[in-house]
Image (cartoon, rainbow, N blue to C red):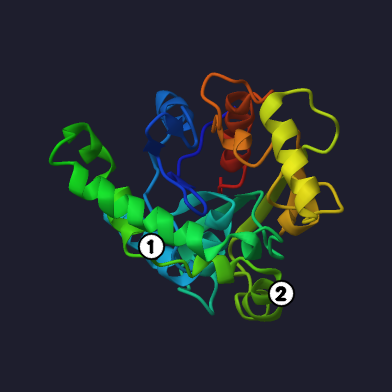
Amino acid sequence: MEVPRYPVVLVHGFMGFDTLLCWRMFSQVRALYESLGVRVIQPQLHPSSSIEYRAKQLMSAIEEAYGKDQPVHIIGHSMGGLDARYLASPAGLDCGARICSIVTMSTPHRGSPVAPLVPRPLTWTLSRLARISLRGQRVFPFLSRYTQYCELLADDRWEALSDLTKEHLNETFNKVIIDHRSVRYFSYGGDITSGSQKMVPRLRAYFARISGAFNEPHDGLVAVESAKWGTFLGVLGADHGAMIGLQVIPGVSSGFDHLPFFEQLMYHLSSQEPA
């Protein structure tokens, strides 16, 4: 099987990052792809700003890495899939001519019921902590590796929470941000409602149940039906973070081995490229 000739862009979702303290998103995926000869970037987008703002950052990151003409594949996790759709759409940034494929993973295409449940005091506190962290770098230099993330979070922009609601995505976004005709769209969902015995999936399922946010299969944050877009490639037996290798509790297994999945996904991307 051949690996993709085109670069792969890994796009994180809401509150996302590359590495933050002991947590990693797309853990070891970039290293795996690069070891097989695939070019990869994993840009840091604003953790909590709007889809439009993040899509513009994504466009800038791709152009900085590969210029304006190099075709790419995009793998978008959660909100990152919406950023990719906006980037490609003729009604968004109209960059679809350079995008070979977009794979979305647990992206809330039809909204997440969890978004409206995030309280304003929590978002204010997170932004405040980011400002404190920036000042604390004078005393604790090791914090400087998180400067970019904290600077973004400290500006107290939380438009993502309204952009991720069912009302916005169904009544506005999906009606306007249509697919680009030259892009191949694929999607995956996640399901933790089938009785996993692992700690983190069980905790996610428990909190989703007591919140009343879901009455259908879901990964803790996004329902399977909401995750479907383009050609639906299947349901992963993983919670929202585990599908990209994020260990919510460091050292505690989620029960999902994400690297074999991403290796197979890499070969799928290669099959989408012109001969």
Report whether residue 238 is seen: no
Pick the front one: 83 or 223 = 223
Q: Which residue is located at x 51 percent, y 65 percent?
A: 120
Q: Is residue 17 above or below residue 117?
A: above
Residue 19 horizontal side relative to residue 227, left or right: left
Residue 142 pos. (x, y %) = 21, 32
**Secondary structure of the residue carrying numbered label 1:** helix
Report which residue position mark 1 lands on: 59
Which dot, 2 or 1, sits closer to the camera?
2
Residue 259 pos. (x, y %) = 57, 26
Q: Which residue is located at x 22 percent, y 49 percent?
A: 134
**Secondary structure of the residue carrying numbered label 2:** helix
Type of residue at label 1? Answer: Met
- Residue sitting at the far left: 138
Pick the front one: 189 or 231 = 189
Disc sitting over residue 170 in the figure = 2
What quarter of the picture does the C terminus occupy? top right
Can you tell which quarter of the image residue 267 is in?
A: top right
Residue 179 pos. (x, y %) = 63, 70
Residue 58 horizontal side relative to residue 116, left or right: left
What's the distance in space between the residues labelled 2 and 1, CA to CA?
24 Å
Q: Is residue 196 above or below residue 211?
A: above
| Circle 2 Cα neighbour tier, 10 Å, few/some/many (<14 / 14–19 / ≥20) | some
Residue 103 horizontal side relative to residue 87, left or right: right
Q: Which residue is located at x 49 percent, y 48 percent?
A: 12
Q: Which residue is located at x 46 percent, y 48 percent?
A: 16
Q: Earlier in the sequence, mark 2 or mark 1?
A: 1
What quarter of the picture does the N terminus occupy? top right
Q: Is residue 175 above or below residue 34?
A: below
Report whether residue 240 is seen: yes
Type of residue at label 2? Answer: Asn
